[in-house]
Image (tube, coloured by chain):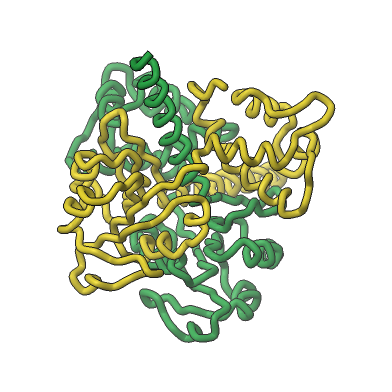
Chain colours: A green, B yellow
Amino acid sequence: MEDRHISKAVIARLPRYYRYLGILIENKVERISSGELSRIMKVTASQIRQDLNNFGGFGQQGYGYNVKYLYQEIGRLLGLERTYHMIIIGAGNLGQALANYVKFEKRGFRIIGIFDRDPKLEGKTIRDIPVMMTSDLEEFLSENEVDIAALTLPRSGAEELCPLLVKNGIHGIWNFAHTDLIVPDDVIVENVHLSESLMQLSYRLNEAHMVKEAEKAAIEE
Amino acid sequence: MEDRHISKAVIARLPRYYRYLGILIENKVERISSGELSRIMKVTASQIRQDLNNFGGFGQQGYGYNVKYLYQEIGRLLGLERTYHMIIIGAGNLGQALANYVKFEKRGFRIIGIFDRDPKLEGKTIRDIPVMMTSDLEEFLSENEVDIAALTLPRSGAEELCPLLVKNGIHGIWNFAHTDLIVPDDVIVENVHLSESLMQLSYRLNEAHMVKEAEKAAIEE
């Protein structure tokens, strides 16, 4: 199976397929046609077929998809068969929200430490996960295998720590800091920029607002 | 200026332009060519020109962009000239993280209330914003103008409350719940699905891992 050169847009849609297939399994659905899946997911059946054809298809003509098989295969593509060791850097509200989200654990993302600069937090635990001091981070990384670092700290802190993470072998960064981190090619950064998401919402609200105003003006003329 | 039918991908890139232009202003840069902006933002100059041409261009041939003007115009497109009243539903860690993020306020997103079901939180405040009971939400909506509801509560709660929000005139939903909400055409939903973002990271980690393994196998042969 050819896994390379899949477009970012397709990859971004895979977790959604995975979510819907998980719900179908919960509801004991065993087979589903691309047409039915299209109706539930509100995307075209041809998009579904095209997306899945990137990975070899998974479907038998006329028989639809085997839900459980497709779920497992997409899970495998998403790398969910492995276990990932994750640390969270920044024990503020957002870091705590991630630490408390038990569903990550179920998917194989095991949070093994939370780091913060605030000495008041030293020795505390969040859902049994120890909060350690950022000054001990390098030692921790040399003694533990860590796959993913979630950065839930301000921009300047994230930029400052990033080289240390890279130097100590971290290959995945889940970046919530409002900056584009500079990393070598073999380090993968996935950004969650909350304020940019909010601005996309306001763009669309504003656009709808302007259309409405223009329509009103046209009626009044 | 023609603002309609702009692709989602372009809209998604606007906040990033806005961020970089803001940094340029902080650094007292007055003019910038698309080539220079391209180097800083690590996208091609032709993409920058194409993106901005969707909105009429903003640049003068040979003179580059006026940073402050471009910043203001993109801000205007993003709807940041207006003020939005926002409520947060779900006062857990994630809701508190949003409530504590003062930068939203600076951009014109004023949080006027936080709602939760937990009676222990009644009467509390988060950064002077009152926490109210979800049972009082409908009354609050009838008495206050609310533009955006941020949903930081579990899937079932979000699905249950969504019709009430729509019925009471909310046109923007910033949805952190792990579900695709069903809303009328004039309601805009912007999703932040954290676990899907994490799965995109694991996809790319896993892909890189497989490539490395394949290369290793090729060398050993």
Residue found at the far right of this picture: B62
A155 shown above or below A220: below
Q: Residue at x 55, y 37 (%)?
A: B76
In the depicted view, which residue is nearer to us: A160 or B51? B51
Q: In this image, A178 relative to B140: left or right?
A: right
B5 shown above or below A127: above
Q: Residue at x 54, y 75 (%)?
A: A116
Residue found at the far front of this picture: A221
In the depicted view, which residue is nearer to us: B18 or A91? B18
In the depicted view, which residue is nearer to us: A13 or A206? A206
Give the percent coordinates (x, y) of residue A112.
Answer: 47, 71
Give the percent coordinates (x, y) of residue B67.
Answer: 72, 41
Give the percent coordinates (x, y) of residue A148.
Answer: 54, 60
Q: Is residue A25 in view?
A: no
Residue found at the far top of this picture: A221
Q: In this image, A143 relative to B112: left or right?
A: right
How many numbered marks have been drawn onto this rendered protein structure?
Answer: 0
Q: In this image, B138 relative to A157: left or right?
A: left
Give the percent coordinates (x, y) of residue A133.
Answer: 57, 80
A144 shown above or below A75: below
Q: Is residue A212 in view?
A: yes
Quadrant showing the C terminus of chain A: top left
Q: Residue at x 77, y 41 (%)?
A: B39
